[in-house]
Image: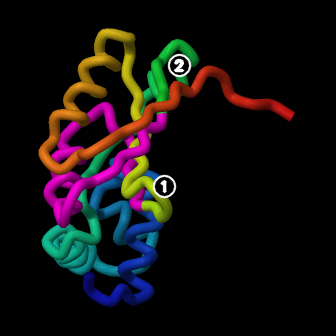
């Protein structure tokens, strides 16, 4: 991963706030030219700093959505291949490496139990996934 300077970090922050912002808008926000923003965006994508552009929908806040956390154990030196396969599944909204007995933690969101069942099966069929444990998120805890 390349070293990020203050322009890169400002650009990433602006994109996190509004990933739909135009190059012109981003340039104005961070005080650089449009050409600089475009060059930086191209480099950040090419080097893997920006892996994908995505949106957050109103459905994500829907309390009826099925949400879960899946703990994943890998078998052998397959992490890169498994991570690539998991990142292709749109129902996986976040993926983290971790320590301890589990190698990865995947956050899953879907709109129905049949769809949830399909995603669980899809993850378990990925070559290199040795074991998994899934916890449904039933309700948000309130204090």
Residue at 46% in and 56% down: 101
Secondary structure type for disc 1 = helix
Image position, residue 64 (x, y; %): 52, 13
Query: Measured along the vertical axis of the image, is residue 72 above or below residue 115?
Result: below
x%, y% of residue 98? 45, 61
Mark closer to the observer (1, 2): 2
Can you say which quadrant of the picture contains the C terminus?
Answer: top right
First of labels 1, 2 by sequence position? 1
76 drawn magenta: yes
Q: Residue furthest right?
A: 143
Which class describes the residues within 10 Å of circle 1: few (<14), some (14-19), or many (20+)? few
Q: Label 1, label 2: how many angstroms apart (C-alpha)? A: 21 Å
Instruction: Report the span colored magenta.
Output: 69-97
In the image, 40 versus 63, the foreground residue is 63
Quick check: 112 above or below 60?
above
- 21 left or right, relative to 59: left
Asked whether 31 falls inside the magenta stretch, the response is no
Which part of the image, by quadrant, shows the N terminus?
bottom left
What is the quadrant of residue 48 in the picture?
A: bottom left
Q: Give the colouring mode of the picture.
A: rainbow
Query: Circle 2 sits in a helix, a strand or a loop, which is it?
Result: loop
Q: Residue at x 44, y 57 (%)?
A: 16
Q: Which residue is mark 2?
A: 62
Q: Which residue is mark 1?
A: 17
Q: Position of residue 121 (x, y in %)?
A: 23, 25
């Amino acid at each position: 991963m390349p070293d990020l300077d203050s322009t890169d970090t400002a650009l990433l922050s602006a994109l996190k706030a509004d990933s739909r912002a135009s190059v012109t808008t981003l340039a104005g926000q961070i005080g650089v030219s449009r050409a600089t923003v475009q060059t930086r965006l191209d480099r950040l994508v090419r080097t893997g700093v920006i892996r994908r552009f995505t949106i957050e929908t109103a459905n994500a806040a829907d309390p009826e959505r099925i949400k879960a956390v899946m703990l994943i154990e890998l078998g052998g030196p397959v992490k890169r291949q498994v991570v690539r396969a998991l990142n292709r599944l749109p129902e996986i909204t976040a993926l983290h490496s971790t320590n301890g007995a589990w190698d990865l933690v995947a956050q899953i969101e879907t709109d129905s139990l049949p769809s949830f069942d399909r995603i669980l099966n899809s993850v378990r069929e990925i070559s290199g996934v040795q074991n998994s444990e899934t916890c449904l998120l039933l309700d948000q805890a309130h204090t």
